[in-house]
């Protein structure tokens, strides 16, 4: 399973990239707003992320609400850099825009997926990625991991990764990430804080502390 980072923060992206496990970036308007970014610099910021992640897919989300607007904005975003993927919501307008953009060779990440039927319709429209959400199901006391399992199975039944990859999204914890991997998700997109937690374990911390203490004894420092 590949790791994407779900952020628009350049420093977080640089740090995750330095760990050697970063395979892509996903962003959205809310994440961009958290950086303090302004409307006039949105495309410039997406370009900076794309340049920082040269060769890795970077999802930049359209904020248009009509099919024509999504197509126009999608073309503009895709033209910024060859690794930019246009992110569109699952809806009638988004499906029509995805169909057109896919015919033009522009990759689309269809987001806000919450059901098998939504995922399959996105695949049929030509989406390169589908992003089913997990954590938001948990927020309403439903089984987000179970829904993810169904979507992964359905997509794999009819489409291979060369056509559409599943991005497990809205992952909140290392447990979510592990479950996505065990289910066979192609990709997990993870906030920086959760990605940090994925490398940590209390037994690892305890082991490192013991090694350090023993080495101090060897050096005569303890």
Image (spheres, helix red, strand yellow):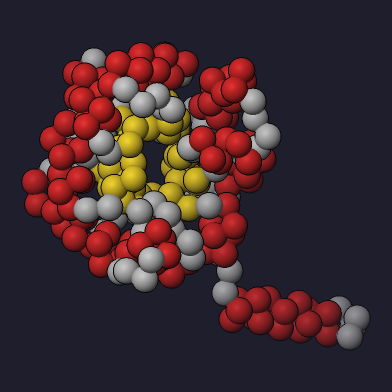
Quarter holding the N terminus is bottom left
Residue at (72, 79) in percent of width and height: 209
Q: Is residue 79 left or right of residue 90?
A: right
Splitting the image into 4 quarters, where does residue 24 fall? top left
Give the image location of residue 44, x and y in percent: 58, 19
Q: Relative to residue 87, is residue 218 depicted above or below?
A: below
Q: Relative to residue 194, is residue 100 depicted above or below?
A: above
Q: Relative to residue 31, is residue 156 depicted above or below?
A: below
Instruction: Examine the rendering and report whether any part of residue 182 can be seen.
Output: no
Quarter holding the C terminus is bottom right
Give the image location of residue 133, x and y in percent: 35, 54
Q: Is residue 145 left or right of residue 160?
A: right
Splitting the image into 4 quarters, where does residue 142 fall? bottom left
Give the image location of residue 187, x and y in percent: 35, 49
Q: Relative to residue 166, is residue 173 depicted above or below?
A: below
Give the image location of residue 102, x and y in percent: 22, 23
Residue at (15, 44) in percent of width and height: 120
Front residue of this view, candidates 141 and 211: 141
Instruction: Examine the rendering and report whether any part of residue 185 can be seen.
Output: yes
The count of marks equals: 0
Splitting the image into 4 quarters, where does residue 126 fall? top left
Front residue of this view, candidates 129 and 208: 129
Find the residue positioned furthest to the left: 158
Residue at (21, 19) in percent of width and height: 100
Residue at (76, 84) in percent of width and height: 214
């Amino acid at each position: 399973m590949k790791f994407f980072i779900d952020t628009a923060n350049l420093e977080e992206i640089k740090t995750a990239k330095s760990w050697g496990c970063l395979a892509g970036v996903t962003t959205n308007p809310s994440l961009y707003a958290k950086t303090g970014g302004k409307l006039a610099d949105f495309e410039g910021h997406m370009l900076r992320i794309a340049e920082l992640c040269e060769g890795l897919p970077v999802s930049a989300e359209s904020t248009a609400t009509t099919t024509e607007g999504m197509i126009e904005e999608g073309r503009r975003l895709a033209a910024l850099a060859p690794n930019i993927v246009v992110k569109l919501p699952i809806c009638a307008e988004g499906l029509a825009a995805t169909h057109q953009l896919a015919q033009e060779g522009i990759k689309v990440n269809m987001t806000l997926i919450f059901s098998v039927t939504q995922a399959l319709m996105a695949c049929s429209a030509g989406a390169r990625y589908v992003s089913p959400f997990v954590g938001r199901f948990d927020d309403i006391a439903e089984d987000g991991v179970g829904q993810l399992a169904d979507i992964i199975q359905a997509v794999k039944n009819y489409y291979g990764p060369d056509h559409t990859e599943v991005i497990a999204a809205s992952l909140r914890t290392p447990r979510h990430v592990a479950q996505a991997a065990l289910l066979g998700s192609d990709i997990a997109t993870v906030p920086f804080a959760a990605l940090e937690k994925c490398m940590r374990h209390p037994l690892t911390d305890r082991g490192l502390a013991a090694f350090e203490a023993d080495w101090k004894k060897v050096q005569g420092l303890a």
